[in-house]
Image (cartoon, rainbow, N blue to C red):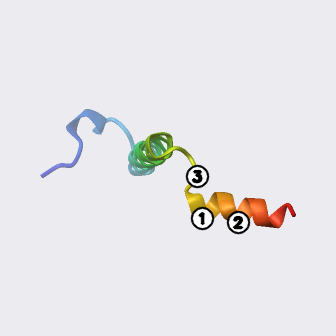
């Protein structure tokens, strides 16, 4: 198994950077999608913010 055949022209560090960038983009995408679907903050965070501003 040779890894990513489309990236064979890149060096090892470049391949690592491409994979790391893709994973980072995926993780941030899942995080922001989850925050949008969940409404941003949960009730415990909101209560903690209200208490701290008193």
Disc 3, SS: loop
Whether residues under marks 3 and 1 lie with C-beta atoms below 8 angstroms apart, the answer is no
Q: In the orientation shown, which residue stands out farthest toward the right?
A: 54
- Would you name the residue on which mark 3 appears? 41
Depth order, front residue of 33/19: 33
Please state if 5 lies on the left or on the right of 12 as rendered: left
Measured as percent of width and height from the top left, residue 1 is found at: 12, 52
Q: Looking at the image, which residue is at 47% across and 48% down?
A: 31
Depth order, front residue of 4/20: 20
Q: Looking at the image, which residue is at 67% across and 62% down?
A: 47
The C terminus, quarter of image:
bottom right
- Would you name the residue on which mark 1 appears? 44
Spatial separation of the CA atoms under disc 3 and disc 1: 8 Å
Whether residues under marks 2 and 1 lie with C-beta atoms below 8 angstroms apart, the answer is yes
Disc 2, SS: helix
Depth order, front residue of 28/14: 28
Q: Residues within 10 Å of mark 3 (few under 14, many from 20)?
A: few
Q: Residues within 10 Å of mark 2 (few under 14, many from 20)?
A: few
Please state if 4 lies on the left or on the right of 31 as rendered: left
- Would you name the residue on which mark 2 appears? 48
Disc 1, SS: helix
Spatial separation of the CA atoms under disc 2 and disc 1: 6 Å
Measured as percent of width and height from the top left, residue 23 is found at: 40, 48
Depth order, front residue of 12/26: 26
User: Is 14 drawn above or below residue 6 in the view shown?
Assistant: below
**Quadrant assignment, res 29:** top left
Please state if 38 lies on the left or on the right of 50 as rendered: left
Q: Looking at the image, which residue is at 50% across and 46% down?
A: 35
Q: Earlier in the sequence, mark 2 or mark 3?
A: 3
Spatial separation of the CA atoms under disc 2 and disc 3: 11 Å
User: Is 42 drawn above or below residue 23 in the view shown?
Assistant: below
Q: Looking at the image, which residue is at 17% across and 49% down?
A: 2
């Amino acid at each position: 198994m040779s890894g990513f055949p489309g990236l064979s022209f890149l060096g090892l560090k470049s391949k690592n950077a491409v994979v790391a960038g893709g994973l980072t983009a995926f993780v941030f995408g899942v995080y922001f999608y989850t925050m949008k679907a969940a409404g941003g903050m949960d009730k415990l965070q909101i209560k903690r913010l209200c208490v701290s501003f008193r």
